[in-house]
């Protein structure tokens, strides 16, 4: 038997062993074949029956012969402890690897590295004969905005941040704020959480003796060092509540909620009907204005203003008045840059 076919057979039998119930009444060969097909293995009942007969000579498998077709299960008290990885786990691990690496502590990523590598090898070996192993070639996650490249994080920064967060320790660092003009200032930081927003990683933390959580971009950190001093967590801090406050939309946690009203172009209205901007959003046709009236409850954040400006002539904000004035000034400045 060729090496590739032998590996495929071993992988199939591996999955078969894991599919057999731990106790009676068990499953028939046809039911087991159906499970294997669901995992991407092209297999018939006769092949499964042959595999069961061969495996029962090596493993404590039981066949209930009281009725046909026989039902297979593991013998009472037996355990299957086979090192390796299931096909479904391999697909899931490879799909998640890119997302997990920046969010997990370096020690955990290091521990998972052999599993990532094993998953890659398993999928590569089965790609020629198994549809499930080729699944990653058929799915892709695309960002709904301009695909900006992720900022460069200094060497060792992520590891120090993760280590301090994992052990509840304070951090010392030099930090460049967005408005500092490139100059750094020393900070003593109490880490609270690590969040990924698009291509940018942020540390949620309190600074010095202050109690209000802030967002610190990892790519603006220099000379990061974990201390052995315990970090301080505000008594009422909740990451879920922090996110819900709008802080990740570049608000300050006290961002006001507004009732947005605007005229929108029919093309944008169709998009918003499919992907509403809030749970209470309403679009009312206004034929006399060749569009729709939008009403929605949203947070007045930088992110909202960026989105409104990015829609150009497809949307005209009517209220709140302060938001309308701010957008009008931005658009005037933008227009001035295009006038000859």
Image (cartoon, rainbow, N blue to C red):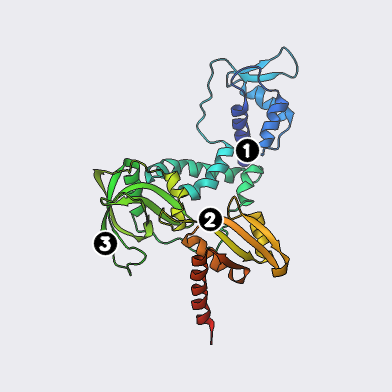
| Viewer-nearest of discs 3 and 2 | 2
Q: Secondary structure at mark 1?
A: helix
How many residues crowd around disc 2 within 10 Å: few (fewer than 14), some, or many (20 or more)? some
**Separation of marks 3 and 2 at Cα, in angstroms:** 35 Å
Tell which of 274 and 121 is nearer to you. 274
> Where does label 1 land, which residue?
8
Q: Quadrant of residue 27?
A: top right
**Separation of marks 3 and 1 at Cα, in angstroms:** 58 Å
- The answer to whether residue 77 is above or below residue 245 is above
Residue with the most extreme right position: 68
| Residue displayed at 59% across by 28% down | 18
Disc assigned to residue 58: none
| Viewer-nearest of discs 3 and 1 | 3
Disc assigned to residue 185: 3
Disc assigned to residue 298: 2
Dot 1 and dot 2 residues touching (CB under 8 Å): no
């Amino acid at each position: 038997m060729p090496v590739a076919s032998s590996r495929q057979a071993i992988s199939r039998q591996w999955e078969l062993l894991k599919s057999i119930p731990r106790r009676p009444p068990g499953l028939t060969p046809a039911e087991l074949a159906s499970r294997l097909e669901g995992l991407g293995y092209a297999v018939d009942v006769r092949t499964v029956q042959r595999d069961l007969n061969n495996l029962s000579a090596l493993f404590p498998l039981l066949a209930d012969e009281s009725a046909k077709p026989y039902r297979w299960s593991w013998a009472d008290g037996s355990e299957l402890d086979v090192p390796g990885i299931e096909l479904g786990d391999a697909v899931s691990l490879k799909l998640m690897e890119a997302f997990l690496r920046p969010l997990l502590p370096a020690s955990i990523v290091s521990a998972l590295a052999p599993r990532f590598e094993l998953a890659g090898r398993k999928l590569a070996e089965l790609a020629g004969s198994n549809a499930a192993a080729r699944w990653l070639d058929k799915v892709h996650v695309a960002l709904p905005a301009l695909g900006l490249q992720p900022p460069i994080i200094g060497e060792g920064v992520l590891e120090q941040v993760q280590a301090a967060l994992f052990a509840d320790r304070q951090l010392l660092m030099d930090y460049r704020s967005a408005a500092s003009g490139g100059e750094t200032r020393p900070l003593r930081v109490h880490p609270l959480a690590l969040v990924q927003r698009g291509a940018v990683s942020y540390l949620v933390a309190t600074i010095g003796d202050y109690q209000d959580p802030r967002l610190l971009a990892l790519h603006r950190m220099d000379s990061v060092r974990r201390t052995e001093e315990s970090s301080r967590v505000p008594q009422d801090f909740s990451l879920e509540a922090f996110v819900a406050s709008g802080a990740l939309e570049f608000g300050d946690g006290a961002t006001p909620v507004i009732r947005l009203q605007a005229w929108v172009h029919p093309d944008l209205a169709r998009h918003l009907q499919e992907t509403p901007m809030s749970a209470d959003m309403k679009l009312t046709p206004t034929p006399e204005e060749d569009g729709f009236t939008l009403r929605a409850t949203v947070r007045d954040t930088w992110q909202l203003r960026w989105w409104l400006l990015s829609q150009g002539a497809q949307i005209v904000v009517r209220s709140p008045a302060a938001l309308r004035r701010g957008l009008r000034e931005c658009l005037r400045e933008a227009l001035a840059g295009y006038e000859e």
